[in-house]
Amino acid sequence: MHLPILLLAVFISLPDGTFECATNGLCGYQPGCGAYQPQPQPSCGCARSYGCGSYGCYRLRARGAKSYQPKRGRSRVTVASSEEDREVLKQRMAMERVRRKERLTESEELDLVSPSVSRNRHSEEPINPDRAFYECCIDRKLPDACLSKCSFGAFTKSSLQAMYFKQDPCPLDAMKEMQFCAAQGRDHRACCARNGVTTTLAGPKCLSFCDQRLGHPQQLDMSYVPCFDRFESMKSCFWHDMTRYYRRV
């Protein structure tokens, strides 16, 4: 049985209100765009080194720590700490502007949503797509059950199917976070159109999964189910466009 048929069965069988959590796209921090953001959980009972976030317990970053990086000498660690201090200061200044309901630039907003994606935008070094995907998921405070899917090999139609059936502890609402991270917050619609993403019963609606710029959240319904039949085509665009965008010139 094809995945769209399975997902259609899920949409029909799940209780009323389930699809209020099924969204695509992140809102960001612009004024008037917050309807789809999940509410933080009041208490998670998390272990040490974990915090309580919107999707459950997430890993806290150690100061100066960045995943997937090789061992460094002491001088390199000092530099990393200074860079982190600058990032924290930039984020605090941006959050102050958010509190004053001032509009942020795209770069400022991305710094708040995912510092790792923002760094990649300015990097002159080749980017490892799996590492970029995972680091963004860490930024988005996803629980371990979701982090295990934050690679291009693990983020699959079958893993999404398990989330829809609630056979996986990663919550359904986290799908939009992983989609954003896989796409690195970019607009990949041109590539997706070339890859045949629009050739389903849902037609051009499927391109919304390829446009992961901030500020374009969408409530999903059954009409989007056929889009998952082109999930690998979307991922292919995310992977190849990422290596093209971030390749040293």
Image (cartoon, grey):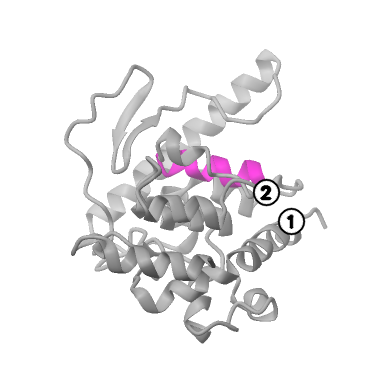
Residue 244 in the image: above or below residue 40:
below
**Residue found at the far front of this picture:** 1
The reply, left or right, for residue 220 in relation to residue 108 is left
Residue, x 64% and y 41% (percent of image)? 131
Residue 137 lies within the magenta run: yes
Residue 164 lies within the magenta run: no
Residue, x 54% and y 67% (percent of image)? 2
Quick one: 245 or 10, which is closer to the camera?
10
Question: Residue under circle 2?
Answer: 129
Disc 2 on helix, strand or loop?
helix
Quick one: 37 or 5, which is closer to the camera?
5
The reply, left or right, for residue 46 in relation to residue 4 is left
Residue, x 46% and y 27% (percent of image)? 61
Residue type beneath disc 1: Thr
Q: Which mark is residue 243?
A: 1
- Badge 2 crowding class, 10 Å Cα cut-off, few under 14, some 14 to 19, many 20 or more, is many
- Look at the image and tell me in which quarter the C terminus lies: bottom right
Do labels 1 and 2 touch, CB within 8 Å? yes
Residue 18 place in picture, x, y as percent: 24, 60
Q: Which residues are magenta?
A: 130-141
Q: Is residue 55 visible?
A: yes
Characterize the magenta stretch by its predominant secondary structure: helix
Residue, x 36% and y 50% (percent of image)? 94
Q: Which mark is residue 220?
A: none
Q: Is residue 34 visible?
A: no
How many numbered callouts? 2
The reply, left or right, for residue 21 in relation to residue 164 is left
**Residue found at the far top of this picture:** 74
